[in-house]
Each structure stands twice: as structure tokens, then as C-alpha cells.
Amino acid sequence: MRRTRQAAGVDRDAAPVRLAPADLIGLGLLGIRTRTARAALSALGIAIGIATLILVTGIPASSQRALEEKLAALGTNRLQVTPAPNREPPVKLPVESVDMVSRIAPVTVASATADFGLNVARSDRTGPGDYNAIAVVATRTNLLAAIDGRVRSGRFLDPAMERLPTVVLGAVAAQRLGFTAVDLSQPLQVHLGGRRFTVIGILDPVPLAPEIDRSAMIGWDAANHWLRFDGHPTRIYVQTTDAQVVAVRSVLAATANPEHPSDVLVSRPSDGLAAKQAVQQTFSSLLLGLAGIALLVGGIGVANTMYISVLERRREIGLRRALGANRGQVRIQFVTESIVLSALGGAAGVLTGAVAVAGYATLQHWPVTIPAASAAAGLGGALVIGVLAGVYPAMRAASLDPTESLSSV
């Protein structure tokens, strides 16, 4: 009798068993290791939800990027400055107007051309009225950057060439003069202003500046030296950002001609800018809505999986409680299992979704765009969902009565 009471006293005074963190994690992974098929299917459900998140955000984002590139080709961030026409005497922009415009903070590129009334011909035998409506314009060396132009053959004017009697032809001008390509080892010449100029390049068509297609471009310094150009630009090309294009337009006239801003015309922003801004707002709302739905579906799937797991493992829970496991250890076991399942499914879902987005975007010839926020939300959301979805099943498991659990079928 004494020994029994002593034994009972020992049991009553014994400290509760405490498990190390590594043991708790191993215990949480027990259900995954022993039920690999069920765990794989559970992770697959989560992966599908997260992959859906990546898909419903990545594919619209790639489509949006492709659409924005097409709208940008309309010149949404470009403006032009010209003197007002039909004035007596004719209006001239100041010589220093290009430099003044380039000092506007949001302006990224400012370039210019100047038409000073000369004609160009393939031969000095060309009749007085046969000039094919090709304008000879003095040109700044950074013109291509301002108009998004590209050289089809040869080269463009640079700081070395702009001082020499050289010329670059627009696409239409080259066609009218009979040039199809430029061989710099055997250059050909044209006649303009009573002098011969060597053709060093031909441009591709420029949709944003069709007047360039019908122009013969010579260097700013060469025009001044060889053709007595007075230095006044007739058209200034300005490139800025979409966010600042309206603000830049409001100060361009006063900046280009401070003394007579009313004598300056500034082009209005492209209608594509309004379309681009509307696209961005619409797609942003769409992506947020679809992402929220995908995360909600994934969370419901995890919660359902963990709840069913508790019902299936009541005997296991009752046995552990009978052997001394406390409620906190049972809760940690199921929460850990839920988090691990969600993390594995989230990682697999992000990878699968990214591959699917890349494949679809490539098939549609879109730029591949996978929002970093979506990938981070997929992984982070999976972990948060794992915690939230595992809380109720874990509490349900911890509240089960050991006797009833062991007697359940």
C-alpha cells in the first residue's frame, strides 16, 4: 500500500514532459511521412491554387506589357515644338531653344531639325523643278533617340561626321533618289545647295515622325559651315516620361521662346497616353481581384484537408494524449503539418505557374512578365494560409477526449 502511494506521489509530483523544438517539428512531419499519398494530394491542391494565382496575374501582366509596348510606339511620351505658322514676319525659334528645353528636369531627350529651304538631287543635271519634294534639314546628332529611329543601312551622323559634307536619307527620300543601300567603302553622293554631299546612311521608316522619311539630314555644324545655316531650329523633338508629359507640355512654349511663348506650337499628348493609363488601372484592379480569389480557394482547400485529417486520426490523437502528450503539443503537431504542406504546395505552385506563364507568353509573342509581388504573395500567402487553415483543426484535435478518441472506430 505504501509503495502504491509512493508511486502515486511520484506520478503526481512529476514534471510534465517537454519536447525540444526539433522533436516538435519531427512530430509535425510525422503525418506527412506516414501518409505520403494523402500529403502529396493535399500539397497538389495547394500548388494548383498558388499556380492559379501566378497564372491569373502573370498572363494578364504579360498581356499588359505587350499592350503598353504597342501604345508606347504611338509616342505617348513624346512632344514636338514648332514655330507658329502664317505669321508676318515668320516666327523663328531662338538658337538656344533646344538647350533650354533639354534643361527641363523631366525631359530625357531633346533634339531638333531645321529646314532652311534647300533641295537635293541625285545629279547636278536635274532640272530646276524636279526635286521630288525632299526637304534638306540640319539635324542634331541625338535625333534618333528622340524619335525612336533606326538606321537601315550605313550609319547616322555623329560628332565627327556632323562637321563634314555628309548626308543621311530618310526612307522615302532614299527611294525617290534611287538609293537602296549604302556601301561606305564606295560611297555615293548627292547635290544640295550647289555642293556635293556624301550619303552615309539610310533610315528605316519613322512612324512617330513621318516628316523625317522625306528628309535629307545633314549635320548642324556642316549646315552652318557649308550652307550658311543661321542656327534657328524649325522643329524640336522632346521625349519625357508618361507621368510628366502633361507637366512638360505646359512649360514647353515658355521655355522654348521665353519672349514670345504665344508664337510657339506644342503638340498635344498622344491619345495612346490616355489609353495606356486606363489599361494600367483596369489591369491593376483585375490582378488584385483574381489574386484574392486564388488565395481564398487555396486556403479553403488547406483547411478542409487538415480538418479531414483530424477526423481520420482521432485514434492516433487519443493514444498520444493517453501517453502523456499535452494539448499544446497536439496543436503544434497539426499546425506544423499544415504549414509544411502549404509551403511545399506554394513552392511547387509558384514554379509551375511561372513555367506556364512563360510558355503561354512565348506562344503569344508577348514579353514574359511574372510580377515579383505575385511570386512573393504566393509563397507568403501559402505560409499564412497554412497557419490560419491549421488553427481550427489543431484546436479541434487538442480538445478531443482521449477516452472517446481511443474508442472511436
Image: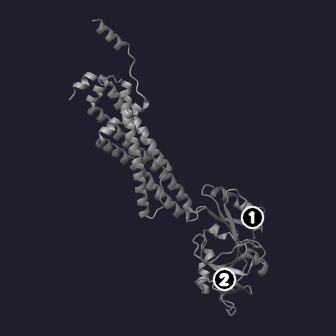
- Assign a secondary structure to mark 2: strand
Q: Are marks 1 and 2 in contact (CB under 8 Å)?
A: no
Q: Vertical placement of 333 versus 378: above or below?
A: above
Q: Is residue 399 above or below residue 46?
A: above
* x and y percentages locating residue 174 in the rendered image: 61, 82
Residue at the outermost top position: 2
Residue 351 screen position, x and y as percent: 42, 51
Find residue 12 and report its horizontal and vertical position in percent. 35, 13
Q: Is residue 309 left or right of residue 24?
A: left
What is the total number of numbered labels drawn onto the structure image? 2
- Asked where in the image residue 405 lies, by quadrant, the reply is top left
Q: Going 64% across and 64% down the picture, which residue do you hit?
A: 79
Q: Which of marks 1 and 2 is in front?
A: 2
* Furthest residue in direction front, as rendered: 3
Residue 352 is tagged as: none
Query: Is residue 55 among the parts visible in the rendering?
Result: no
Mark 1: few, some, or many residues within 10 Å (few <14, many ≥20)? few
Q: Which of marks 1 and 2 is nearer the N terminus?
A: 1
Q: Residue at the location (39% across, 19% down)? A: 16
Amino acid type assigned to the residue bearing label 2 in the image: Val
Question: In the image, 302: left or right of 86?
Answer: left
Q: Examine the rendered structure and indicate whether residue 359 appears above or below residue 141.
A: above
Please report the residue visible at 62 percent of the width from the left and 86 percent of the height from the top.
177
Q: Residue 99 carries which label?
A: 1
The residue that label 2 is drawn on is 199
Residue 331: image location, x then y, percent:
37, 29
